[in-house]
Image: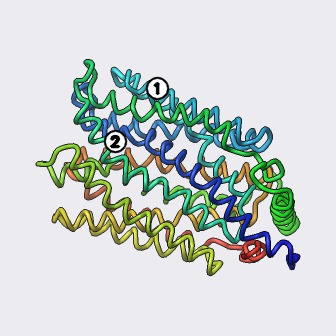
Amino acid sequence: MSIPLAGEQLAPTVLRKVIWRLIPFMFLLFVLNILDRVNVNFARLQMLDQLGLSEQMFGLGSSIFFIGYFVFQVPSNLIMNRIGARQWISGIVVAWGLISCSMMFIRDERSFYILRFLLGVAESGFFPGMILYLTYWIPAGERARATACFMSAAATAGLVGGPLSGALMYYLDGVAGMAGWQWLFLMEGLPTVIMGFVVLVWMTDRPEVAGWLTADERGWLSEQMNREAKEREQQHGFTLKTTLANGRVWLLTLLYFMLAAAVTGFVFYLPQFMKEKFPDQSLPVIGLLTAIPYLLSIVCMVLSGAHSDRTGERRLHVAIPSFIAAIGWAVGACFDDRWLVVAALSVAAAGMYSSFGPFWSLPNAFLTGTAAAGGIGLINSFGNLGGFVAPIILSEVKTATKSFSGGMLAMSLTMLIACGLALSCQHDRTADEVATKP
């Protein structure tokens, strides 16, 4: 379908305004989201001994997060689609920030499990809500790059979170009678609570009510996004019921399960990987070492998303990085040289994270409206059960073998399966081609 000349003239300006208004703010929220989810990985370096928790207890506690995360994603997205993102996301951010701060009060195994579960419940609606939110604002042909820029926050959280967490635990340990791990939860949770209230001021529900766009710009963007939604609906005709029963959606769910399992295993155990390879280093140095894989990942994520949008290709942009990640995991498992392991884990991280932007363009190419809300929630909720499995596998293998090598090989196999699943996925390239190109 051709775009009127006025639309061609407006498109670059509107897209630039939308991207600069939304993506940096969403990026910052996602950084806080990941920090408050995974800072327990650094806290474990102190809290396990201080609280008498075993490796298996930590693995289970880390995984319980994903049970709470699993349960509420689909209803959360349906509620957000009905009442709007601004109020709903604000409540979500404040809730998980408060629970993250409350992690400082963990005293035993039971309180650890309860708070991790509640944190999963509170965070469950944020990520699928943000993916759905992008479908309100970003045309399909631009979405992989926008999604990759947004999701690079996950790698950025690792980049800044490692050094920050290590420094907080090292320098604040004992201050005011609190352990370093307690200060970690408090100092990284409070900014989240503040940002939850900023959401009410900064976020806008839909293009039609965006006061920071001109009337012509609002009209063009609203028409563009509505036209895309109608064309996807006419082409596929998915309802919420048919979406939840669709084999293609479940294939994407299985693929995301594999991606989430490997990434979660990486994130939750990277500080321990580094501590084992560099036992003579302090916590601040370990934090800096964990930043190395994430630095490479940020660059690769953005490049992969941009190239996927430019070519219109999605499946290979998931499959090839997954295969590269499998190689990285395998090399890390099979060699002992510590700098080679750092390099291998950096390659694995770059491959895993690079697949996410193109991946989320696959379901968004054929789902819209309530179907998109339910489908995205379904894929992310069931897919993230991989995050429940991975820490348990790694902790059990570590306890049984006194080494992470077996668990790393399991993560390599997971990424090989993800590669095969990506190649078997269907991609509607025409859905991306209806988007306006500046």
Amino acid bearing label 2: Asn
Q: Residue at x 15, y 48 (%)?
A: 281
In the image, residue 30 above or below residue 200: below
Asked if one can make out residue 54 in the rendered structure from this viewpoint, the answer is yes
- Residue picked out by circle 2: 41
- Name the disc covering residue 309, or none: none
User: Please, which colouring scheme is shown?
Assistant: rainbow
In the image, residue 86 above or below residue 364: above
Asked if one can make out residue 237 in the rendered structure from this viewpoint, the answer is no
On the rendered image, what quadrant is the N terminus found in? Answer: bottom right
Expressed as whole percent of the image width and height from the top left, the position of residue 326 reads 39, 68
Amino acid bearing label 1: Ile
Residue 220 quadrant: bottom right
What SS does tag 2 mark?
A: helix
Q: Residue furthest top?
A: 177
Cβ–Cβ under 8 Å for marks 1 and 2: no
- Residue picked out by circle 1: 114
On the rendered image, what quadrant is the C terminus found in? Answer: bottom right
**Sequence-earlier tag: 1 or 2:** 2
Expressed as whole percent of the image width and height from the top left, the position of residue 408 reads 32, 59
Of the pair 428 and 6, the residue shown nearer to us: 6
Expressed as whole percent of the image width and height from the top left, the position of residue 312 reads 65, 78
